[in-house]
Amino acid sequence: MNANKKCKTYHFNQEWELEFFFVDIKGKCVCLICRDTLSIFKRGNIERHYRTKHADFDLKFPTHSSLRQDKLKTMKLKLNQEQSVFKNPNKLAQNVTIALFKVAYLLAKKKKPFSDGELIKEAFKEASDSLFTDFKNKSEILGAISSIQLSSNTVMRRIGAISSNQKTQLQTDLSKCSYFSLQMDESNDMIDTSQLSIFIKMCFDDFSVKEEFLKVLSLTGRTRGEDIYKTFKQFVEEEEIPIEKLASITTDGAPSFCGNKKGFLALCKNDNSFLHFFQYHCIIHQQALCGTVININNVMELIVKIVNSIRGKKTLKRRLFRELMDEVDCHYGDLLLHSNVRWLSKGKVLHRFKELLPQIKIFLQEIDIVYEELENIKWLEDFSFL
């Protein structure tokens, strides 16, 4: 046998649809009458099948007649409907999975319990029952909603899958980026455990920039510069972060970070795995320090005094103030309390006080309390500066 002999290739002829009632579906000849399949597009095989099994079809539907053409269209439509029975469930299952991931992501983003998934599903069903009353496919919509599995365990697994995917994407970005910079801040959580928050900003070859939250590292023991350095170095080695691409590190200027000998930055610079990088001071923290150095205590003390008088232990003033907010249809419903532990809260308190200053003046007049500073131009200038 000649090894160089080429195999003959057969192609489906569109005329065979009307002549023998065969169609081409994914490389196979399918008989529209009995659903048998032939693997080779060969006229002899197709004609033999038609003449043997469907010899009386020419009598019922004569060749080149409009009746035969109509019959062909009807049978092709029926075949498509049969195929859609198998395609639609797959498409529905895919859409249900996407919807489940979106709901799970929303629960995680809003910091809601996983068990709220069942509540969301019930709300979907109740709302859909009224919204789609006049829709012909109402039963299909309700069936699709019922097929969404939103149990707490399912939501937990989906959030875990989202987390793993985000981690994979971040690792891919780190491998593709040209350089990256880090922003670090250390603070205590609600149970007095020190947490090191790390943000990363990556720069790519096309000069595009991407910023992401990298990691929160727990410092269970002491929070010295060497402790932060060891924890961070262990994280870098475990996650295989390309530290040679590091361009800069931004901190809040604390001694544990900026110490000349035992600070975190000094230890990093003495490590050969860290190439040359720049160090910066956080601008937001500099603004907070500036507010303490300038010493405009008269502004902050008065604001804290007014806020505490409204939101203090006497709940009557707070209720009256909220009623005033409702009457004037204010965007904000209440004032914010200041906490010295959270240094960013000062800016939020000042911003909220500024937005509600006209309403605060009206409220203080109604309860016969006068603060002359609120009309003093010098005090208002200092307040605007802060």
Image: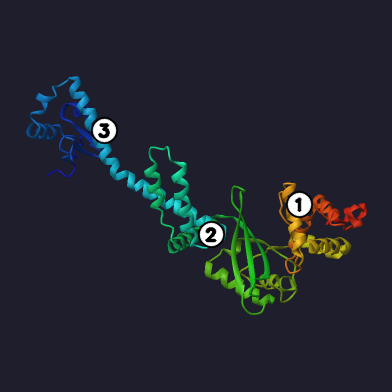
Amino acid type of the residue that numbered disc 1 sits on in the rendered structure: Leu
Q: Earlier in the sequence, mark 1 or mark 2?
A: 2
Residue type marked 3: Leu
Residue at 59 percent of width and 50 percent of height: 205
Q: Position of residue 376 (x, y in %)?
A: 92, 53
**In the foreground, 111 or 223:** 111
Q: How far apart are marks 1 and 2 (CA)?
A: 35 Å
Q: Is residue 283 visible?
A: no
As drawn, the label of residue 324 is 1
Q: Where is residue 188 in the image (x, y as percent from the top left)?
A: 67, 72
Residue that mark 3 sits on:
77
Quadrant into which the N terminus falls: top left
Secondary structure under tag 1 reads helix
Q: Which of marks 3 and 1 is nearer the N terminus?
A: 3
Secondary structure under the numbered disc 3 in the rendered image = helix
Label 2, on which residue?
108
Q: Depth check: 348 or 365 in front?
A: 365
Tell which of 1 and 70 is nearer to you: 70
Quarter of image, res 73: top left
> At 33% from the left edge and 47% from the top edge, which residue is drawn?
89
